[in-house]
């Protein structure tokens, strides 16, 4: 498994696969070959089908120092379904360098022509069972396990926590409409203000949803956001962080540890299935985020290692089959609302784990549900995997006279 630094990333919204990954690849391309007067990028897969709505063309143009042409194509014969060709051309428009770039989910990239050290495995264990067996054998905690591989991770995650808080606070104070043809009204500030009129039973839930909306709306507006594990699901971890630090006054160090623990489960999903909506549907994004957040919340609420695994398993199991069908290709509908629901489901998963663990042992393991998620993702039709050609995206176009 890779470093957890490849799971949590700060970058420009609205999409980790469509903006962070291309931005990262373009910057690396320039570092490798230097500036050229002309560039062209040819996009395929989800990058092509929803690239306009996700601002992929804009982020590529803004990330390269020369005049850049972006082309949206369909005939892609490479091994991974989501990617693009990036070419540098001299003053005579003659190609000098070319990379084949795969956007593999969560802002991570692979380059056919170049080895990237950050994609190398850092953790020896490959699934939850192997991790759990080591914890028991060596009598260590899950945080001990993580920091034994990444002793500098606490500082990195501390900066991630700061970025999450910043994104939520910006979102809670912003008003107006999000960019694009949907003309979607920002709702986080109003939703948060409604919490003050709620009874105690509702107040925390409304605030959590407002925090998730705030982070997602910032990402949808193209602002700096944090993958958790993707930008399509960024509101869930952000809401967790903000709530436990600002509302519950938990020490920052404890929340940092919680992100490390949630990251372990996200890493298992990423290694054995996918966190890419273009590959596995939204179960790979929001489902993974709910699972990660459920594990983090279980830790923060003092649950033991078996209960933490159970919470992560519940979070993933009950998002199986979740499709990715963004309306008009924007990371807005159903994405933002789904994040608001996702943080509540993560909290519910931890709560259910706490109480059901006192009644009986759970039958389905985390590894089992991750394997199931991977197989389910393979069976989801391509129209429901971030292409905007099915589901709600298709229904919206059938009802409203809006050009896709």
Image (cartoon, rainbow, N blue to C red):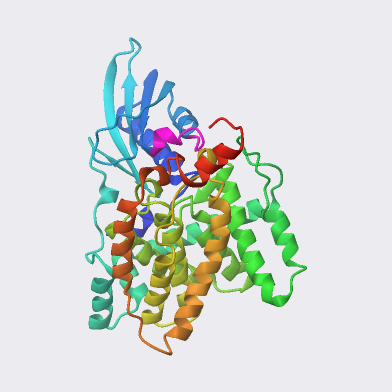
On the picture, is 117 further left or further right than 357? Answer: left
Residue, far front? 398
| Residue 168 place in picture, x, y as percent | 61, 56
Is 2 placed above or below 73 here?
Answer: below
Q: Residue at x 31, y 36 (%)?
A: 101
**Number of labelled discs?**
0
Q: Foreground: 212 or 341?
A: 341
On the picture, is 308 further left or further right than 13? Answer: left
Q: Foreground: 104 or 314?
A: 314
| Residue 288 place in picture, x, y as percent | 41, 60
Q: Residue at x 57, y 52 (%)?
A: 336
Is residue 330 one of those drawn in magenta? Answer: no
User: The magenta stretch spans which residues?
Assistant: 46-55
Residue, far top? 92
| Residue 327 place in picture, x, y as percent | 53, 42
Q: Residue at x 50, y 44 (%)?
A: 326
């Amino acid at each position: 498994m890779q470093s957890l630094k490849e799971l949590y990333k700060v970058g420009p919204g609205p999409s980790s696969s469509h903006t962070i990954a291309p931005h990262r690849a373009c910057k690396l391309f320039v570092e490798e070959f230097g500036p050229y007067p002309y560039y062209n990028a040819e996009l395929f897969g989800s990058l092509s089908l929803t690239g306009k709505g996700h601002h992929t063309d804009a982020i590529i143009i803004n990330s390269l120092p020369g005049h850049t042409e972006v082309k949206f194509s369909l005939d892609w014969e490479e091994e991974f379904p989501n990617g693009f060709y990036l070419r540098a051309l001299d003053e005579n428009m003659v190609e000098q360098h070319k990379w084949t770039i795969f956007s593999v989910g969560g802002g991570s990239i692979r380059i056919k022509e170049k080895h990237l050290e950050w994609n190398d495995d850092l953790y020896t264990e490959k699934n939850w069972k192997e991790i759990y067996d080591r914890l028991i054998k060596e009598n260590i905690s899950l945080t001990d396990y993580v920091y034994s591989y990444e002793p500098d991770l606490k500082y990195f995650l501390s900066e991630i926590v700061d970025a999450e808080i910043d994104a939520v606070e910006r979102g809670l104070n912003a008003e107006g409409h999000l960019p694009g043809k949907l003309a979607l009204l920002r709702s986080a500030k109003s939703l948060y203000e409604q919490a003050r009129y709620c009874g105690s039973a509702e107040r925390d839930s409304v605030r959590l949803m407002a925090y998730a909306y705030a982070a997602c709306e910032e990402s949808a507006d193209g602002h700096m956001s944090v993958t958790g594990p993707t930008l399509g699901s960024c509101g869930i971890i952000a809401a967790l962080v903000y709530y436990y630090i600002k509302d519950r006054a938990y020490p920052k160090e404890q929340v940092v540890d919680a992100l490390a623990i949630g990251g372990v489960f996200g890493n298992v999903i990423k290694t054995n299935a996918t966190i890419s909506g273009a590959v596995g549907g939204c179960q790979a994004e929001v489902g993974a985020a709910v699972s990660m957040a459920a594990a983090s919340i279980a830790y923060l609420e003092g649950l033991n290692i078996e209960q933490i695994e159970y919470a992560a398993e519940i979070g993933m199991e009950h998002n199986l089959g979740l499709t990715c069908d963004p309306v008009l290709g924007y990371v807005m509908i159903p994405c933002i609302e789904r994040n608001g629901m996702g943080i509540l489901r993560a909290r519910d998963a931890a709560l259910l784990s706490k109480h059901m663990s006192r009644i009986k042992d759970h039958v389905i393991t985390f590894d089992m549900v991750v394997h199931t998620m991977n197989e389910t993702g393979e069976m989801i039709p391509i129209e429901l995997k971030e292409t905007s050609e099915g589901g709600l995206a298709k229904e919206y176009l059938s009802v409203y006279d809006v050009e896709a």
